Image (cartoon, rainbow, N blue to C red):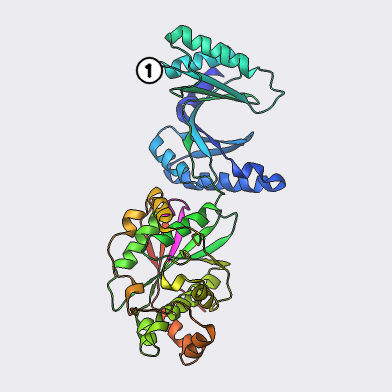
């Protein structure tokens, strides 16, 4: 038995994963936990053999010792639903064995002061956490001649006792929090090359949504720089959801047709309404229930209350705006935190700058816009755009691939 245990410990390393919000979901909690386990497994399986187990109030990951810790850490830190995780070490529920294990684990660590924190998952586990703290603290002191310091957080020995097992770890690594992806359904994000929409997408992903990306670029009148930039942003966001689909929609010809048919002050409103119509058609094809935009109230002319109302009237699908009450500084701060900011500020040729008037309307009237649209061949305009749309598949750990678009009704 000792030989088998030794072989297993050499073959596998362990990570203890803790969740927070999903732990208070009542009778539906198991659905959230099962989905989180599935997400963890899919995120890590690309590196080699992984075993993910449900434990009491936590999740245990066993991974092949040949897999680097950096890969495990990066994947788990971008997996929504995780509060924190730790590289951990297992021991039987036996105080002398736990002491011996800790002695070996900290033998090469530089420690000035330390403290011990023991917790157990059930009250009926026959140990006293206070007694274990005291016994283990005294043991470390006698071996390393180190002072105990409860206030300073220089080095903490964490011990978690669950039925049949003890886990020992020394560092808590923050996860992304939120809910496991997929629990809240699927959505389509209108992803520009700017700062706002990647943050909006990320915030909805954090709330358990799987996101498809739709980007509108100015081809054939502008270069593909914004399209490539959108793909780069989508690849960063894909770190949080494993697999993504990106639609690149050439919008220049449609914009030109609007320019030739309408007054300058109405063009931006019409552009946005057509974008929503196209995104809705793509969403219907993908069986997606809602749209996401990066709009923030009052930030630009198209984002006044009046214009937002007129624009969203073009579609029946719900539109979620997770940034609506945030100011630019708040959005920039979060863009930096999720590593999209540097790409977002790279110069490009955004379709939003193509054929844009100097003074767009800030208080549009729906009946005026609908009268203008009644003179336009809306269905034909959209059909032409969709026929030239490109689709890319992003898979974590692989290069992006272009696929042939199916007919979009």
Q: Residue sitting at 41 percent across and 78 percent down? A: 268
Vertically, is 78 above or below 363?
above
Residue 393 percent location from the top left of the image: 42, 62
Residue 361 or residue 122, whichever sits in front: 361
Q: Is residue 67 left or right of residue 408?
A: left
Residue 251 percent location from the top left of the image: 37, 77
Q: Residue sitting at 42 percent across and 83 percent down? A: 266
Q: Is residue 20 left or right of residue 400?
A: right
Q: Residue furthest bottom?
A: 375
Q: Quadrant of residue 55?
A: top right
Residue 293 or residue 308, whichever sits in front: 308
Residue 339 percent location from the top left of the image: 37, 50
Q: Residue sitting at 51 percent across and 73 percent down? A: 308
Q: Residue furthest top?
A: 142
Q: Quadrant of residue 284?
A: bottom right
The quadrant in which the N terminus is found is top right
* 295 drawn magenta: no
Note whether residue 371 is visible: yes
Residue named by callout 1 = 108
Vertically, is 12 above or below 409?
above
Residue 274 or residue 105, whichever sits in front: 274
Q: Residue sitting at 52 percent across and 9 percent down? A: 138
Residue 310 or residue 208, whichever sits in front: 310
Note whether residue 407 is visible: no
Element on which disc 1 rests: loop
Vertically, is 352 above or below 101?
below
Q: Which residues are magenta?
A: 237-246
Vertically, is 137 above or below 264?
above
């Amino acid at each position: 038995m000792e030989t088998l245990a030794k072989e297993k410990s050499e073959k596998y390393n362990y990570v203890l994963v803790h969740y927070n919000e999903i732990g208070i979901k009542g009778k539906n909690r198991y659905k959230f936990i099962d989905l989180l386990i599935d997400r963890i497994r899919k995120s890590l399986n690309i590196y080699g053999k992984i075993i993910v187990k449900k434990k009491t109030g936590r999740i245990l990951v066993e991974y092949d010792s040949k897999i680097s810790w950096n890969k495990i850490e990066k994947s788990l830190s971008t997996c929504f639903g995780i509060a924190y995780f730790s590289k951990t070490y297992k021991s039987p529920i036996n105080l002398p064995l736990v002491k011996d294990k800790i002695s070996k684990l900290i033998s090469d660590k530089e420690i000035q002061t330390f403290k011990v924190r023991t917790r157990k998952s059930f009250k009926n586990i026959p140990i006293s956490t206070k007694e274990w703290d005291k016994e283990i603290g005294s043991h470390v002191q006698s071996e390393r001649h180190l002072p105990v310091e409860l206030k300073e957080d220089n080095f903490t020995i964490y011990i978690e006792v669950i039925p049949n097992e003890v886990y020992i770890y020394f560092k808590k690594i923050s996860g992304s929090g939120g809910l496991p992806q997929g629990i809240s359904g699927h959505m389509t994000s209108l992803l520009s090359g700017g700062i706002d929409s990647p943050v909006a997408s990320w915030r909805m992903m954090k709330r358990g949504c799987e996101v498809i990306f739709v980007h509108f670029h100015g081809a054939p009148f502008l270069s593909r720089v914004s399209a490539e930039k959108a793909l780069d942003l989508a690849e960063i966001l894909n770190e949080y959801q494993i697999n993504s689909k990106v639609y690149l929609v050439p919008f220049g010809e449609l914009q030109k047709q609007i320019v030739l048919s309408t007054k300058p002050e109405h063009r931006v409103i019409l552009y946005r309404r057509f974008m929503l119509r196209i995104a809705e058609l793509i969403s219907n094809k993908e069986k997606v229930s809602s749209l996401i935009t990066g709009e923030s109230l009052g930030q630009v002319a198209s984002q006044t209350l009046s214009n937002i109302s007129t624009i969203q009237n073009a579609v029946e699908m719900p539109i979620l705006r997770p940034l609506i009450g945030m100011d630019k500084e708040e959005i920039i701060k979060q863009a930096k935190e999720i590593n999209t900011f540097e790409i977002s500020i790279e110069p490009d040729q955004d379709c939003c700058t193509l054929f844009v008037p100097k003074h767009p309307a800030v208080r549009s009237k729906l009946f005026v816009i609908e009268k203008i649209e009644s003179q336009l061949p809306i269905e034909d305009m959209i059909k032409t755009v969709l026929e030239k749309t490109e689709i890319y598949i992003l898979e974590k750990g692989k290069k992006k691939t272009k696929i042939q678009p199916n007919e979009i009704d």
